[in-house]
Image (tube, grey):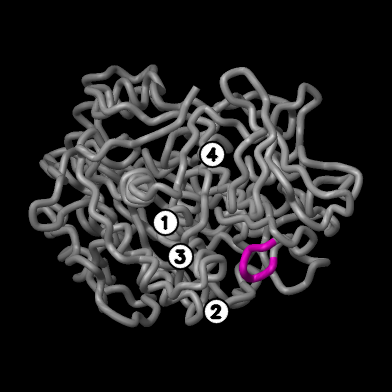
Amino acid sequence: MALHYDIIIIGTGAGGGTLAYALRDAGARVLLLERGDVLPQEPQNWSPTAVFDQGRYKNAETWQDTQGRPFHPGVHYYVGGNTKVYGAALPRLRREDFGALEHEGGTSPAWPISYEELEPYYAAAERIYRVHGEPGQDPTEPPRSGPFPFPAVPHEPYIEALCADLRRQRLHPFALPMGIDLREGGLCVRCKTCDGFPCRVLAKSDADVCAVRPALQRPNITLWTGAYARRILTDAGGRRATAVEVERGGERQVVPADVIVVACGAVNSAALLLRSAGGAHPNGLANGSGLVGRNYMVHNNTALMAVAPLRRNHTVFQKTMAVNDFYLRGPGFPYPLGNLQLLGKLQAGMLTAAQPLVPRPLLAAMADRSVDWWVMSEDLPDPENRVTFAPDGGIRIHWQPNNLEAHRRLIAAGSLMLREAGYQIVLTQRMGIATNSHQCGTLRFGHDPATSVLDPLCRTHEVLNLYVVDSSFFPSSAAMNPALTIAAQSLRVAEHLAGQPAARLAESAPVSAETPLNTESE
């Protein structure tokens, strides 16, 4: 007979990890399930060749596109989920993102909560994830109840000079909110291997370090690694979830709980609910609306590399600046375009994965003279963009990008901005279906059970004790990094489950690089 838990949380990323942290003192017996293991601290963490060219930490199974062609998704199964390798950019969504917003490609739907309702939880999440920023620089910045927990990450001289160039163009570059440990006595060494790399010294504010490890310091929180949630079981009427069927060490067991929270990522959470179909839920658990797996979004993303052949870029930690002047409308265009933000400094070993036929010395020379950007536009919800299963039972992603005119215009605006700043060469590369680190929308929340899967507190409309706290709940993708919004909503759900205010849930529990990660693995 398996031990009965008060709450089971499936997934340990920005949603599940944050929820466990927030519940650590609530008195509930909580089981965290992670299908992967602890990502090792090792020299390869900081190797561009190992991380990008060899894909050392990409451990997800192969998925298929609409035509059945296989691809390797950009998801990672480790304690901390995708935050183990994310770029640590932790901005809030804009206030306008919570209302209906007209785009050239269609309407971005309103959320069932307002920015003002989520703001206290944003503030709490920024404290948990040690966010560094500077208010008052971004023209689209929403109102804040207080300052950032820590001052902005300083620009290095090359980036500071670029900021001045952009201001001369009457643009408003701002300090990108970042989750890294630059506190006094902090662990961050401002290396070149943050964006897209695991942090070897645990200085990145990922869900493992900032949420799961502090949670596990409490005896009521248990973590199982190597634990794959196959199905969620319900009572005969289908109104209550009763247990999770877990595969662990080659064996299956049924683990009962009073409350079950799904936080596997937008694709895997939808897949789990679809796999959990049963008598009362023949088309998938909580799928009376038919929307489970639909409205999959991932952003329209392009990497932009601006090269000044006669000027070296000696910047080490480059990811400190963003531009939102085109977020709500473009030049000569009445619709939103999106966000421009610096990438971590590109290196030759990172580029060889994308350009294997270009000689490495040429790639190195270009990387030494480039400034590197991520160009991000909103991907609008479309019910035909969805998660299903292939005939072999694997995951199939149906995705046709939309709102592409806005994205093309944002690339053009960014390219012109950089040419006017003295970069003679601007190279771009659109990201395809495998670049899905910002996946969202497959289990949207809302007030109406006919048009949403979850209610505004992320409980499924049809199963009274089943919640989802990852980016599945997003009704729209906006054009900002989603991690802080996931964490903020997780705190809002935790407040509901624990009956404790957000400020209490976000109290600091410092973790050092020596803090062990206690797991129960097979």
Magenta segment boundaries in residue numbering? 455-459
Q: Considering only order in the chain, which callout, 2 or 4, is on the residue closer to the N terminus? A: 4
Residue at image mark 2: 114
Q: What crowding class fits label 3: few (fewer than 14 Cα within 10 Å), some (14-19), or many (20 or more)? A: many
Question: How much space separates mark 1 and mark 4, taking CA atoms?
Answer: 15 Å
Which residue corresponds to the image point at 50% horizontal and 53% vertical from the top-left?
15
The residue under label 3 is: 488
Q: Which residue: 48% across, 31% down?
A: 225
Circle 4 Cα neighbour tier, 10 Å, few/some/many (<14 / 14–19 / ≥20): many
Cα separation, mark 1 vs mark 3, equals 16 Å
Q: Nearer the viewer, mark 3 or mark 2?
A: 3
Mark 2 and mark 1 lie on one chain; the one further toward the N terminus is 1
Q: Name the residue under label 1.
A: 24
Identify the residue at image location x=67%, y=43%. 256
Q: Distance between the residues labelled 4 and 3?
A: 21 Å
Secondary structure under badge 2? loop
Q: Position of residue 498 (x, y in %)?
A: 51, 67
Task: Please name the residue that numbered disc 4 is placed on.
Answer: 33
Q: Which residue is drawn at 40% across and 26% down?
A: 57
Q: Mark 2 is on which residue type?
A: Ser
